[in-house]
Image (spheres, rainbow, N blue to C red):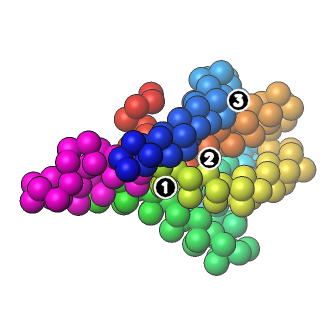
Amino acid sequence: MWKILLTVSLIPLAFSIIARWWFGLRVLADEGQRLCRCDLEVWLPEPGDDAVIHRAEAPAAEFGRQLRLKALAAWAERDPKSATARENNRRFGMAVPPLSGIVAVMAVLVAKIPIMGAAVVVLTATALSCALGLLSLGPELQAIALAVRQARERRTFPNGDDHDAVARSAIAHAWKETLPPVIALFQR
């Protein structure tokens, strides 16, 4: 029984780790270091940003992170139900693996399951969190694509290469943040 669950859990975990690296971390490592310039007349601060001074020049990864946050804020205004569902999936992914670890340790302590079973329970919960995170990623990517299109129309980044690097970085941040934080322990 444990071997079947282990095998079924390792497939989405492996796919999630590979996808996070390929679409997120790799892109941020390649494109994220590029120094980009924006038009501060058009580039509005991210939601909740109270800083008086904003820089017109920053790495693409930073502009991408800010663009993703702006896209999520606009999505929450446009379609609050869908945006809330996505955020709840992220919270689920953050909470379930550690909580399943606590339950598994308690089950081992009271001798209800073997140690191998506890490890498989934690891996299965993490795989479920990864699968739900990846399945709910599509609407977030659509919201980012809309924000990227609006930024291109407003000519936020005068250089087209800068705009492309920021767009790829924003999408990479979405891929990076969609999986449970426990996955980040294995990838840096």
Dot 1 falls on a residue whose secondary structure is helix
Of the two numbered discs 3 and 1 in the rendering, the one whose residue sits closer to the viewer: 1
In the image, residue 6 above or below residue 58: below
Find residue 5 and report its horizontal and vertical position in percent. 43, 48
In the image, residue 92 above or below residue 24: below
Nearest the camera: 23 or 72?
A: 23
Which residue is rendered at x = 30% and y = 57% of the image?
A: 100
Read off the magenta span.
100-125
Of the two numbered discs 2 and 1 in the rendering, the one whose residue sits closer to the viewer: 1
Q: Residues within 10 Å of mark 3 (few under 14, many from 20)?
A: many
Instruction: Say if mark 2 contacts mark 1, CB within 8 Å.
Output: no
Of the two numbered discs 3 and 2 in the rendering, the one whose residue sits closer to the viewer: 2
Which of disc 1 and disc 2 is earlier in sequence? 1
Nearest the camera: 92 or 170?
A: 92
For residue 160, say whether it is visible. Answer: yes
Q: Furthest residue to the front?
A: 1
Which of disc 1 and disc 3 is earlier in sequence? 3
Q: Residues within 10 Å of mark 1 (few under 14, many from 20)?
A: some
Find residue 81 and report its horizontal and vertical position in percent. 64, 78
Nearest the camera: 181 or 31?
A: 181
Dot 2 falls on a residue whose secondary structure is helix
Q: Which residue is mark 1?
A: 128
Q: Which residue is mark 2?
A: 174
For the stretch drawn in magenta, the main secondary structure is: helix
Which residue is rendered at x = 54% and y = 40% of the image?
A: 11
At label 3, the amino acid type is Cys
Which residue is rendered at x = 36% and y = 60% of the image?
A: 95
Q: Residues within 10 Å of mark 2 (few under 14, many from 20)?
A: many
